[in-house]
Image (cartoon, helix red, strand yellow):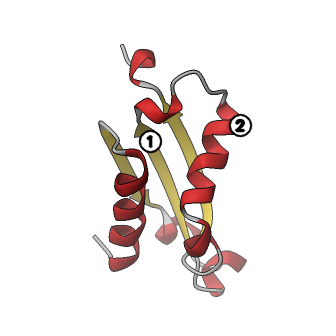
Amino acid sequence: MSTRSDAIRARLIATFAPTECQLEDDSAHHAGHAGAASGGGHYTLRIVSSHFEGLGRLSRHRLVYDSLLELMHSDIHALAITALAPSEIQ
């Protein structure tokens, strides 16, 4: 795992204390894309946390983006988010 992925994961764990945090670096699939040229990576995130209980999808995504704000300007070009509350897991 890259240092960039480690930093993203560490920030998410510190902020949300998730029961699940799967972060995939999809940057290799976007080679030649404008975001790749600027150095920002492409990621897919699945996170399960009690912090998302009772919140809608947009609110959950805002919380994730807010927690990664500093990294969004340099290390992250695209982030696909699936944010769930524990009660939503089968």
Residues 19 and 25: in front is 19
Residue 74, how many percent across, how many down? 60, 81
Mark 1 secondary-structure assignment: strand
Q: Is residue 37 above or below residue 29?
A: below
Residue 26, how many percent across, how many down? 48, 62
Judging by the rendered image, the residue that carries numbered circle 2 is 58
Question: At 32% from the left edge and 69% from the top edge, which residue is drawn?
Answer: 6
Residue 59, how many percent across, how many down? 68, 37
Q: Can residue 82 be seen in this view?
A: yes
Badge number at residue 10: none
Q: Is residue 55 above or below residue 24?
A: above
Question: At 67% from the left edge and 27% from the top edge, which residue is drawn?
Answer: 56
Judging by the rendered image, the residue that carries numbered circle 1 is 46
| Labels 1, 2: front one | 2
Looking at the image, do the residues carrying marks 1 and 2 touch, with CB atoms under 8 Å apart?
no
Question: At 35% from the left edge and 47% from the top edge, which residue is drawn?
Answer: 22
Q: In this view, does 45 lie to the left or right of 65?
A: left
Q: In which quarter of the image is the N terminus?
A: bottom left
Q: Can residue 76 be seen in this view?
A: no
Q: Residue furthest bottom?
A: 38
Q: Is residue 2 left or right of residue 16?
A: left
Quarter occupied by residue 70? bottom right
Mark 2 secondary-structure assignment: helix
Say what amino acid the circle numbered 2 marks: Leu
Residue 50, how many percent across, how many down? 42, 30
Label 1 to label 2: alpha-carbon separation: 15 Å
Q: In which quarter of the image is the C terminus?
A: top left
- First in sequence: mark 1 vs mark 2: 1
Q: In this view, does 73 lie to the left or right of 82?
A: right
